[in-house]
Amino acid sequence: MIAEILSIGDELLRGEIVDSNKSFLSDALLRIDIPTRFQTSVCDDPEDMTDAFVRAAERSDVVLVSGGLGPTRDDLTIEVLARTFGQELVLHEPSLEAMRAFFARFGREMAPNNEKQAWLPQGGEALPNPVGTAPGCLLEAGGALFFCMPGVPRELIQMMDEQVLPRLRVRAQAEGGGVTRVALLRTFGMGESTLDNELQDLAHDDGLTLGFRTAFPDNYLRPMAHGRNEAEAAERLAKLVDAIRRRLGSLIYGEGDETLEQVVVGALAAAGRTLATAESCTGGLVAQRLTGVPGASAVFRGGVVAYANEAKRDLLGVSEELLEAHGAVSGPVARAMAEGARKRFGADYAISTTGISGPDGGTDAKPVGLVFVGWSSQDEDVAEELLFPLDRARHRMVTSQVALDWVRRSLAGEPRVSPRYLGSRRS
Amino acid sequence: MIAEILSIGDELLRGEIVDSNKSFLSDALLRIDIPTRFQTSVCDDPEDMTDAFVRAAERSDVVLVSGGLGPTRDDLTIEVLARTFGQELVLHEPSLEAMRAFFARFGREMAPNNEKQAWLPQGGEALPNPVGTAPGCLLEAGGALFFCMPGVPRELIQMMDEQVLPRLRVRAQAEGGGVTRVALLRTFGMGESTLDNELQDLAHDDGLTLGFRTAFPDNYLRPMAHGRNEAEAAERLAKLVDAIRRRLGSLIYGEGDETLEQVVVGALAAAGRTLATAESCTGGLVAQRLTGVPGASAVFRGGVVAYANEAKRDLLGVSEELLEAHGAVSGPVARAMAEGARKRFGADYAISTTGISGPDGGTDAKPVGLVFVGWSSQDEDVAEELLFPLDRARHRMVTSQVALDWVRRSLAGEPRVSPRYLGSRRS
């Protein structure tokens, strides 16, 4: 089976929005072993739409259509699709009822032009939309299966998961197709080409693929395994993931949607430990990432953003002498900041950052990109010098990632390594 | 002239990345009055690519091709394009030289497979790529202009701006086409439908359009003006922008790429004033946004992320009695936090946040979504109660936006209004 994705809407062709539906749909199809061969976007124009429908039916088996299901005159998907394949539109009473109930839930009356959304092609099947007004529609026409879905990502995602994928899974199985399972492993600290070299022998088997994706400052691994059925694919994927994990060890910090800050908050909670932060160049980014995790209040005591030297002195207890002797961007000050934060907040651990994120403020001795990360626990106060020749936003981002990764590694009893692939150097 | 955008690459069809190039290219074309009628993505497959090239030439005048210019065997764009239209490939010496120089700048030797990137169709024109290895290519074939660009967004954007758009502008003018100018006005504090009602009479003239775009928690206005030439379009746009500004006043905080935090840092610098922050529920987000702006160190003294009550007491001087009498999430505590931050950091102003971002921690009296924003200057200490029934991330985001907008409004002598359209209430 070959799939095609067809997005409809003037706003796409005017470049007003970035279409994230296409990648979501293609990724979902890939997991049930249906490759996407074409992605097309056309305007709300009957002629172009007709042309696209005809062509899609000729060359593809499954066509996922998104957009153009709204109540306005511009929304023509169902009408044009029906006309293209010689179908009448008929009022689908259950969909009309569902729409009325949807509006009633929000205490609003349904506008007359919404009724149009309940008219579906005679031979079609309605696809319920529990989170919006427009029902979707499945129509088998011209030798292809057309699934029409709303363009609103939230509605499309739910309809794809609940209505479209189950129907396609049954068909794919009936045609003897297999199943593909995908995992996402999140790594920090090794470059993509090095990862590729380290792992290239692992996915040489037929039906195993190892993909890479860069999501600065991380690199994600995307192992995929194909099998004749769910169980076989799952088993093969588990083996591949296991082999990768054995090789990379603590370089992998998380799997799937799990962010580094979620891992850190979870690890602190599991250990019953608390953390504080003292940030200069990252300016609150570390604290903000931690506190974005629900439940962070149980493990995060607080932090100081100490931009001015006086703040480092008054709020973190960094001595005037230390600041004068070494400068604010130095290992001793990073250590003192971390120690000060740990004590002031009464936390078990503290992490600190001080550096020059640029674009200005660098000198020959302390160039833009230089940064010190500090760590304080009851047992030790340490700091490390790093150099990331990156723009301000990425410098701050990678520094916050190093800081959070240090917390993770310290809690796991792993050595605190720093990324070597971004031009870093150690003192 | 009708344009078509053609993206090439397996990674798109596998759903591994969201293609933001298409919206960038369509938006750029719209500004020179060339509408995009089709957007298509195909795999690195010679047959599908040939088909897409032929079809694009048939139905479009301008074809912007992205991707497939790399050095690997999968990168086939130039080769297949040349073959499709019966052109030989020839080595383009200046591009080869440019590539060698590019590698030399990074102290690396050029790999042999990079040479392939300097082979271009005989009748084509090379488009220099100063930020990457692959040159682009312009080929007039099959009745259409094909512009081939790298898929890497940074390289594509620069090549579009420097090479493609100037050439297209000349052609569009020669064909008697007009010019469209677009502005972006950033507003915070009024809902999209209210904005629409307020402004709907302003863009009724022929050639004037007023678009809207939601970028939570802001709403952007996108006025467009069409003219026979650059000067006419610019004049009409300036008039429209002026009319909108007169009507909305301080609701508009910035224009174009200017973020609220940039506006705030700029206004503080212009006034020669300094700011400090005291954050509970936003957890460093306000500080992080401010310090993301280059030059923030001149106006931002620092901040405290006071998650635990002890931190509010020890680092901000909020009294135990106040915390016990009113609770941490209260107007008096918000005021005391702001006052404490202002004094501890020796700043002219301070802003504070304390609230319940959820998903847990709410009570009947203080539900999830409740938040207090506080402000302290030498003249006043104030706080306001707001309720945003949103998820954690958006609750924190809109709270940080209110806080920054208060700073902006205070510096401008404008009243501190809060958004009314997100379910907010005032005490």
Image: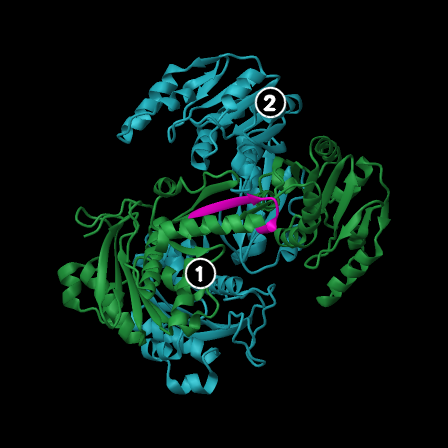
Chain colours: A cyan, B green
> What x and y, as percent, mark residue B42?
66, 36
Chain-order first, disc 1 or disc 2: 2
Left or right side of A211 for B134 = right
> What x and y, as percent, mark residue A215?
55, 53
Image mark for residue A50: 2
Q: Quadrant of the C terminus of chain A?
A: bottom right
Give the residue type at disc 2.
Thr
Question: Which residue is at the front of the view, A209 or A96?
Answer: A96
CB within 8 Å, label 1 to label 2: no
> What x and y, as percent, mark residue A340?
35, 75
> What x and y, as percent, mark residue A399?
49, 65
Q: Residue at x 54, y 76 (%)?
A: A362
Image mark for residue A408: 1
Q: Which marked residue is nearer to the observer: mark 1 or mark 2?
A: 2
Secondary structure state at the residue bearing disc 1: helix
Give the residue type at disc 1.
Arg
Does B268 sit above or below residue A203? below
Does B125 sit above or below residue B405? above
Q: Quadrant of residue B171?
A: top right
> Is residue B226 in the magenta section?
yes
Q: Main secondary structure of the magenta part?
A: strand
